[in-house]
Amino acid sequence: MIRQVFNSAELISLLDDNGRLQEPVTLVDGGIYTGLQALTSLENLTFAKDCRLYNLSSIPILKDLTLADDGLLHDLSAVTAIENVMVAKGCALWNLSAVTEIKSVTMSNDSRLWGLSSLLILKDLVLAEHCCIDGLSSVTAIENVTLADGCGLWGLYSVTSIDRVTLADGCGLWGLSAPMKKRLADLRAANTKEA
Protein backbone atom coordinates (compact mmCIF):
# COMPACT_ATOMS: atom_id res chain seq x y z
CA MET A 1 0.00 0.00 0.00
CA ILE A 2 1.29 3.45 -0.93
CA ARG A 3 1.95 5.75 1.99
CA GLN A 4 -0.33 8.80 2.28
CA VAL A 5 1.44 12.02 3.22
CA PHE A 6 -0.57 14.58 5.17
CA ASN A 7 1.82 17.52 5.67
CA SER A 8 5.03 19.19 4.53
CA ALA A 9 7.21 17.88 7.36
CA GLU A 10 6.22 14.31 6.63
CA LEU A 11 6.93 14.74 2.92
CA ILE A 12 10.33 16.33 3.53
CA SER A 13 11.28 13.56 5.99
CA LEU A 14 10.97 11.02 3.16
CA LEU A 15 13.61 12.67 0.95
CA ASP A 16 17.02 11.12 0.42
CA ASP A 17 20.28 13.11 0.33
CA ASN A 18 19.62 14.01 -3.32
CA GLY A 19 16.15 15.44 -2.64
CA ARG A 20 14.27 12.49 -4.15
CA LEU A 21 11.46 10.56 -2.50
CA GLN A 22 12.73 7.25 -1.11
CA GLU A 23 9.38 5.49 -1.65
CA PRO A 24 6.11 6.05 -3.53
CA VAL A 25 3.73 8.38 -1.71
CA THR A 26 0.34 9.93 -2.37
CA LEU A 27 -0.80 13.37 -1.31
CA VAL A 28 -4.18 14.04 0.29
CA ASP A 29 -7.15 15.88 -1.20
CA GLY A 30 -6.85 19.59 -0.39
CA GLY A 31 -3.38 19.14 1.09
CA ILE A 32 -1.04 22.14 1.31
CA TYR A 33 2.68 21.41 1.22
CA THR A 34 5.16 24.26 1.68
CA GLY A 35 8.91 24.70 2.11
CA LEU A 36 9.74 22.11 -0.54
CA GLN A 37 13.01 23.67 -1.73
CA ALA A 38 14.89 20.41 -0.99
CA LEU A 39 12.66 18.38 -3.33
CA THR A 40 14.47 17.78 -6.65
CA SER A 41 12.07 15.36 -8.37
CA LEU A 42 8.35 14.60 -8.43
CA GLU A 43 9.02 10.94 -9.20
CA ASN A 44 7.21 8.55 -6.81
CA LEU A 45 4.61 11.23 -6.05
CA THR A 46 0.89 10.73 -6.70
CA PHE A 47 -1.14 13.91 -6.72
CA ALA A 48 -4.54 14.33 -5.09
CA LYS A 49 -7.39 16.66 -5.95
CA ASP A 50 -6.90 20.31 -4.97
CA CYS A 51 -3.44 19.74 -3.48
CA ARG A 52 -1.00 22.65 -3.48
CA LEU A 53 2.78 22.42 -3.51
CA TYR A 54 4.87 25.53 -2.86
CA ASN A 55 8.58 26.38 -3.07
CA LEU A 56 9.45 23.84 -5.78
CA SER A 57 12.49 25.84 -6.84
CA SER A 58 14.92 22.87 -7.06
CA ILE A 59 12.98 20.78 -9.58
CA PRO A 60 14.83 20.80 -12.95
CA ILE A 61 12.28 18.93 -15.11
CA LEU A 62 8.60 17.97 -15.08
CA LYS A 63 8.36 14.59 -16.80
CA ASP A 64 5.92 11.66 -16.89
CA LEU A 65 3.42 13.27 -14.51
CA THR A 66 -0.35 13.18 -14.17
CA LEU A 67 -1.68 15.99 -12.03
CA ALA A 68 -5.03 15.74 -10.23
CA ASP A 69 -7.88 18.23 -10.68
CA ASP A 70 -7.47 21.75 -9.26
CA GLY A 71 -3.85 21.25 -8.22
CA LEU A 72 -1.23 23.97 -7.91
CA LEU A 73 2.53 23.70 -8.37
CA HIS A 74 4.23 26.95 -7.39
CA ASP A 75 7.73 28.39 -7.88
CA LEU A 76 8.92 26.08 -10.66
CA SER A 77 11.68 28.55 -11.54
CA ALA A 78 14.37 25.87 -12.14
CA VAL A 79 12.29 23.75 -14.53
CA THR A 80 13.78 23.79 -18.05
CA ALA A 81 11.50 21.22 -19.73
CA ILE A 82 7.95 19.89 -19.42
CA GLU A 83 7.54 16.49 -21.05
CA ASN A 84 4.74 13.94 -21.07
CA VAL A 85 2.67 15.79 -18.48
CA MET A 86 -1.10 15.68 -18.13
CA VAL A 87 -2.27 18.96 -16.62
CA ALA A 88 -5.67 18.09 -15.14
CA LYS A 89 -8.78 20.26 -15.02
CA GLY A 90 -8.26 23.50 -13.11
CA CYS A 91 -4.54 22.95 -12.47
CA ALA A 92 -2.00 25.76 -12.49
CA LEU A 93 1.79 25.63 -12.85
CA TRP A 94 3.49 28.86 -11.76
CA ASN A 95 6.86 30.56 -12.32
CA LEU A 96 7.99 28.56 -15.34
CA SER A 97 10.54 31.20 -16.32
CA ALA A 98 13.37 28.78 -17.27
CA VAL A 99 11.32 26.43 -19.48
CA THR A 100 12.72 26.15 -23.00
CA GLU A 101 10.86 23.02 -24.14
CA ILE A 102 7.30 21.72 -23.91
CA LYS A 103 6.68 18.26 -25.34
CA SER A 104 3.70 15.88 -25.13
CA VAL A 105 1.74 18.06 -22.71
CA THR A 106 -2.02 17.63 -22.36
CA MET A 107 -3.94 20.60 -21.01
CA SER A 108 -7.41 19.88 -19.63
CA ASN A 109 -10.22 22.41 -19.17
CA ASP A 110 -9.38 25.54 -17.17
CA SER A 111 -5.70 24.66 -16.74
CA ARG A 112 -2.96 27.30 -16.64
CA LEU A 113 0.77 27.61 -17.31
CA TRP A 114 2.27 30.86 -16.03
CA GLY A 115 5.52 32.72 -16.72
CA LEU A 116 6.98 30.90 -19.74
CA SER A 117 9.31 33.78 -20.56
CA SER A 118 12.22 31.65 -21.92
CA LEU A 119 10.22 29.49 -24.34
CA LEU A 120 11.11 30.27 -27.99
CA ILE A 121 8.71 28.02 -29.92
CA LEU A 122 5.20 27.00 -28.87
CA LYS A 123 4.33 23.89 -30.86
CA ASP A 124 2.43 20.59 -31.00
CA LEU A 125 0.00 21.55 -28.27
CA VAL A 126 -3.76 21.12 -27.77
CA LEU A 127 -5.50 23.29 -25.20
CA ALA A 128 -8.90 22.26 -23.85
CA GLU A 129 -11.60 24.81 -23.03
CA HIS A 130 -10.68 27.95 -21.08
CA CYS A 131 -6.95 27.18 -20.81
CA CYS A 132 -4.37 29.92 -20.49
CA ILE A 133 -0.64 30.14 -21.14
CA ASP A 134 0.91 33.39 -19.94
CA GLY A 135 4.28 35.12 -20.16
CA LEU A 136 5.22 34.01 -23.67
CA SER A 137 7.34 37.07 -24.31
CA SER A 138 10.23 35.21 -26.02
CA VAL A 139 8.14 33.00 -28.30
CA THR A 140 8.96 33.70 -31.94
CA ALA A 141 6.93 30.92 -33.57
CA ILE A 142 3.62 29.16 -32.95
CA GLU A 143 3.26 25.86 -34.81
CA ASN A 144 0.60 23.15 -34.80
CA VAL A 145 -1.38 24.51 -31.85
CA THR A 146 -5.10 23.95 -31.31
CA LEU A 147 -7.11 26.09 -28.90
CA ALA A 148 -10.61 25.14 -27.74
CA ASP A 149 -13.31 27.62 -26.69
CA GLY A 150 -12.19 30.48 -24.46
CA CYS A 151 -8.43 29.81 -24.49
CA GLY A 152 -5.79 32.50 -24.30
CA LEU A 153 -2.10 32.87 -25.09
CA TRP A 154 -0.58 35.97 -23.50
CA GLY A 155 2.54 38.08 -24.08
CA LEU A 156 3.17 37.18 -27.73
CA TYR A 157 5.21 40.32 -28.47
CA SER A 158 8.07 38.51 -30.25
CA VAL A 159 6.08 36.22 -32.58
CA THR A 160 7.16 36.39 -36.23
CA SER A 161 5.65 33.12 -37.47
CA ILE A 162 2.26 31.45 -37.04
CA ASP A 163 1.57 28.15 -38.79
CA ARG A 164 -1.10 25.45 -38.41
CA VAL A 165 -3.01 27.15 -35.62
CA THR A 166 -6.66 26.26 -35.05
CA LEU A 167 -8.76 28.57 -32.91
CA ALA A 168 -12.24 27.98 -31.55
CA ASP A 169 -14.67 30.75 -30.60
CA GLY A 170 -13.63 33.14 -27.88
CA CYS A 171 -9.90 32.42 -28.13
CA GLY A 172 -7.32 35.16 -27.92
CA LEU A 173 -3.66 35.52 -28.85
CA TRP A 174 -2.56 38.64 -27.01
CA GLY A 175 0.38 40.90 -27.78
CA LEU A 176 0.74 40.09 -31.49
CA SER A 177 2.16 42.67 -33.90
CA ALA A 178 -0.06 44.03 -36.69
CA PRO A 179 1.35 41.63 -39.35
CA MET A 180 0.83 38.66 -37.04
CA LYS A 181 -2.73 39.79 -36.27
CA LYS A 182 -3.37 39.78 -40.02
CA ARG A 183 -1.81 36.32 -40.35
CA LEU A 184 -4.05 35.10 -37.53
CA ALA A 185 -7.13 36.60 -39.20
CA ASP A 186 -6.20 34.82 -42.45
CA LEU A 187 -5.86 31.52 -40.57
CA ARG A 188 -9.24 32.02 -38.91
CA ALA A 189 -10.82 32.70 -42.31
CA ALA A 190 -9.22 29.58 -43.77
CA ASN A 191 -10.41 27.48 -40.83
CA THR A 192 -13.95 28.83 -41.24
CA LYS A 193 -13.90 28.07 -44.95
CA GLU A 194 -12.71 24.47 -44.33
CA ALA A 195 -15.46 23.90 -41.75
Image: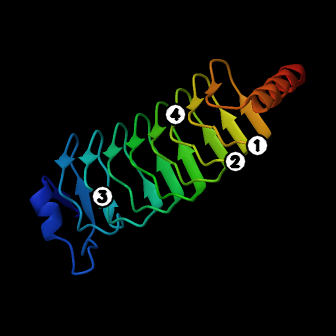
Q: Which residue is mark 3?
A: 56
Three-letter code for the amino acid on which mark 1 is drawn: Thr
What number is the disc on residue 140? 2
What separation in Å lies between label 3 and label 2 (alpha carbons)?
28 Å
Q: Quadrant of residue 136?
A: top right
Q: Which residue is mark 1?
A: 160
Q: Which residue is mark 4?
A: 132
Q: Nearer the viewer, residue 19 or 155?
A: 155
The percent coordinates of residue 61 (x first, y second) are 45, 65
Q: Is residue 48 above or below residue 129?
A: below
What separation in Å lies between label 4 and label 2 (alpha carbons)?
18 Å
Q: Are there few (<14), some (14-19), or many (20+) residues within 10 Å of tag 3?
A: many
Q: Nearer the viewer, residue 145 or 87?
A: 145
Residue at horizontal 38 percent and vertical 57 percent from the top:
77
In the picture, which quadrant includes the N terminus? bottom left
Q: Is residue 170 above or below residue 61?
A: above
Image check: 146 left or right of 28? right
Image check: 80 left or right of 93? right
The percent coordinates of residue 102 (x first, y second) are 58, 55
Residue at horizontal 27 percent and vertical 79 percent from the top:
18
Image check: 29 left or right of 47? left
Q: Secondary structure at mark 1?
A: loop
